[in-house]
Image (cartoon, coloured by chain):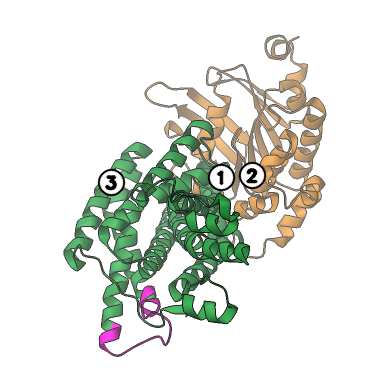
Amino acid sequence: MDQLNALIVFLNFVFVPGLTYGAQLSLGALGVTLVYGILRFSNFAHGDTMAFGTMVTILFTWWFQSMGLHFGPLPTALLAMPFGILFTALFVLGTDRVVYQFYRKKKSVSTILVIVSVGVMFVMNGLTRFIIGVENRNFEDGERFLITARDFKTLTGLDEGLAIKTTQVITVVVAILVVAAMFWFLNRTRTGKSMRAFSDNEDLALLSGINPERVVQVTWILAATLATVAGVLYGLDKSFKPFTYFQLLLPIFASAIVGGLGNPLGAIAGGFIIAFSEVMVTYAWKKVATYALPDSWAPDGLLQLMSTDYKFAVSFSILILVLLFMPTGLFKGKSV
Amino acid sequence: MAEPFLIGDTMTGGYGSSDILNACTIAVEKGEIAVIVGPNGAGKSTAMKAIFGMLSLRGGSVRLKGEDITKLSPQDRVSKGMGFVPQTHNIFTSMTVEENLEMGAFLRRDDINGTLNQVYDLFPILRQKRYQPAGELSGGQRQQVAVGRALMTEPSVLMLDEPTAGVSPIVMDELFDRIIEIARSGISILMVEQNARQALNIADKGYVLVQGANRFTDTGAALMADDDVRRSFLGG
């Protein structure tokens, strides 16, 4: 029984949160890796693209709510998300037309594009704060729990409860759907294949008659979609605050690099590796250990390797280790 | 003399300010094989790139079926019926063999299955490995993928930049056989070759370039028989 309780505590505080956070990071990293593979630069504005998309989604959510429009037990934000995606895609395409296209025509090296994306990041950053403010926003509505800790306890008769939030289930389900759609698109459709061809060998893609501007546009639309979905899921699960989204850039880049930049499969694996490392290193294992070990071995301390304040140090350390010993990442991406 | 199928006429040009090509003329007739040979740095590949539009000319013109295409971009020349196989980086390594061929046919909107089967009939090994990433294939098989990709647009002229570079002699003979087969189907072949002797053996027309200009031009057999050419360029 104690072992079972230990397992439930582990699932409740480590596995489920890690899985949810991992799904969110994977979606973010997928966007970063896509832009890197095709446009050949690290897009520092991705975190703020997520914030922008989430902001638009929140504005539409409020509007829908004020009209009395709800999505039953599901959050209204899911109804608003397509609009968030649409506006973000338009904004990002506009940015490409006004900013990136100029440097692409000049055939600027990727370091210049990285700096340009930092500039874009600051503009989006300011714009988001200007429109919706800097505060924490909670825009989740509908049913909060799929199963509460109390229900779980009465149901199973165990001492420990396993709570599963609706947003956690939504995160995982939506992430699976989006990733499946993305892979189907890249591997099965003509446009998707032409994007992979462009990423693989730009000159030969041009010789084959692939239109580079079209590939770039589709890439931006996909990146905006992934960013908005990742941002909304993260905001539903936790809360929306522009600064937090800016900070997410580090674990997202760490995920993409750990998996191998430019490799979509790697981005997903990287997202889960970073998420689980962060959660496991900052979790206090005392309770799990107390259940799992014999009484006489019960620990006195918290068994927490690092305070949660330092969670970014985890992704940063993994990032540095990977860059030192495995520069192309786990799934053979391009080296940075 | 009638206008050749494809001709790069008195082409002059190069990269930057200095000219690599000096009034160089290369032509190929319908369904024939023309080979460009010459010492290193003679401008063989440059002449090829100039005909395909990857180099802007200062003088001369390029004409396909009598039509002046000097100002067209390489992509536009592909849709006019020219296929080009670069010397290196000529396949999509991360994509499967079949996807490589599909990308070759990217400009086509009709059913490509017929052409796909023709390419597989020409290179049976590719049918066997159609779902393997092209980057996992051997050097000779990669060249087959590269040639197959260029054939997917159903070009009327196929340009090959050193198709046998880095492959074994047996594979080279095999590739030359396939190239003859392609030419017999009515596609004109223009290729640059390091293996001058073998290439001239299968050539209807041979061009010996030196310093960006035509030194000798004749049928392949005549060039092989020519003492001057043999002594200077074919090693005796």
Closer mark to the observer between disc 2 and disc 3: 3
Which quadrant holds the C terminus of chain A? Answer: top left
Q: Which mark is residue A118?
A: 3
Q: Which residue is mark 1?
A: B64
Which quadrant holds the N terminus of chain A? Answer: bottom right
Residue at 72% x, 48% y is: B132
Callout 3 amino acid: Val
CA separation in Å, label 3 and label 1: 48 Å
The answer for which chain carries disc 2 is: B
Q: Answer with left or right where residue A134 lies relative to residue A219.
A: left
Q: Is residue A88 above or below residue B48?
A: below
The answer for which chain carries disc 3 is: A
The answer for which chain carries disc 1 is: B
Circles 2 and 1: CB atoms closer than 8 Å: yes
Q: Answer with left or right where residue A120 lies relative to residue A328.
A: left
Q: Which residue is mark 2?
A: B157
Closer mark to the observer between disc 3 and disc 1: 3
The answer, for residue A11, to whether it is visible in the render is yes
The local crowd at label 3, few if under 14, some if 14 to 19, many if 20 or more residues have their Cα within 10 Å, is some
The location of residue A71, given as percent across then percent down, is 40, 85
The local crowd at label 2, few if under 14, some if 14 to 19, many if 20 or more residues have their Cα within 10 Å, is many
Q: Is residue B69 above or below residue A18?
A: above
The answer, for residue B188, to whether it is visible in the render is no
Residue furthest left as drawn: A130
The location of residue A167, given as percent across then percent down, is 43, 73
